[in-house]
Image (cartoon, rainbow, N blue to C red):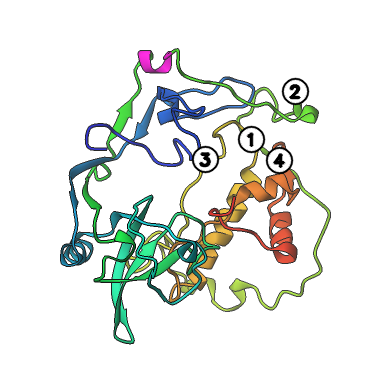
Amino acid sequence: MHNNNVTDETCSIYHARGYDNGMKCSNITKCRNCDPHEPCFVPDEYLVYRVDEFAHFSGEQNMMQEIYQRGPIACGIAVTDAMENYTSGIFEDTTKDMDVVHEISIVGFGEENGTPYWLIRNSWGTHWGLQGFMKLVRGKNNLAIESDCAWATPTDTWTNKETHITTDEEKNDPNNDDTNGPYPNHMESQSFLGDDSNSCRRLKSDAKLNIPIIRDAWADFDYSTLPANWDWRNVNGTNFLSWNKNQHIPEYCGSCWAQGSTSSIADRFNILLKDQLTTPVALDAQVMIGCAGGGDCNGGDPSLVFEYGYNDGIPDSSCE
């Protein structure tokens, strides 16, 4: 990241594959977009991010200083059966395992009932541990947590919205895999989105869930009392929105109905949980598309997504 620009997940999503098992490095791997019925492509330009300084380091006090002054760090850690089954409390390994086989980030530290701990964010999903987090005893190099860490400082590429300008050579890279599809059989005709449209249709449904609405938002406030400007990205310095998504990668799908609805209700969970939130909520649109939760890649109805959520619940993005 110091030597190369990297992109975000609206440009290149996680595939759980790498250069050695199916995802060769190419320009379209770094940033990809797709339109219906056409090969995917490298966008003309895209936002980039970089690292300034970076280093390996170790030691409890150095780690605490780095976290407090500049933010979370990445560290190696040993993994035991008990750690994999962790659910709550301050974990302390008793096997003396020091074989570093896993990497995590440490986002904070504290003390509970006289026991110091590290607050660790894992990458095993929110169904593990404390909604994806773990408290590990601090100051004992338990699981080798204080042996091998790394920090980096970000380069400010966003103030001036620094972009990568794609060259013709990058667009025509022979390693680019521009495969788009396949589309479901019942969508292969011209009715799928239409030849002249890059949008998905909103397919209305007559199905209505009989849920009594307690009140409408507009019943509480007079229109004249609303502020001239309101933005949930910045409410007294707090951004309540879940992350942006790109429905067009890794191949095109007319899932706007699933993306917009899951994004809006995830944002509302963030607003509702503002005093309890440990990490922003992000709800999964894939389940809606795969489980007939309101439509398919040909379009759908957002209200049916909410009906699905009412009846069955919606998993978060760490599950699917």
Identify the secondary structure beneath mark 3. loop
Q: Are marks 4 and 3 in contact (CB under 8 Å)?
A: no
Residue designated by label 4 = 299
Marks 1 and 4, the one that precedes in the sequence: 1
Q: Are marks 4 and 2 in contact (CB under 8 Å)?
A: no
Residue 98, placed above or below residue 2: below
Q: Amino acid at mark 1?
A: Cys
Q: Amino acid at mark 2?
A: Gln
Q: Main secondary structure of the magenta part?
A: helix
Q: Amino acid at mark 3?
A: Asn
Q: Judge the density around disc 2: few (<14), some (14-19), many (≥20) Cα neighbours within 10 Å.
A: few
Marks 1 and 2, the one that precedes in the sequence: 2
Residue drawn at x 55%, y 33% is 250
Tell me where the magenta segment starts and ends, as one range. 169-173
Q: Give x and y (percent) for residue 91.
A: 40, 72
Structural distance between the alpha carbons of marks 1 and 3:
10 Å
Circle on res. 190: 2
| 255 drawn magenta | no
Q: Give x and y (percent) for residue 164.
A: 31, 29
Side (left or right) of 186 relative to 257: right
Structural distance between the alpha carbons of marks 4 and 2:
14 Å
Q: Amino acid at mark 4?
A: Gly
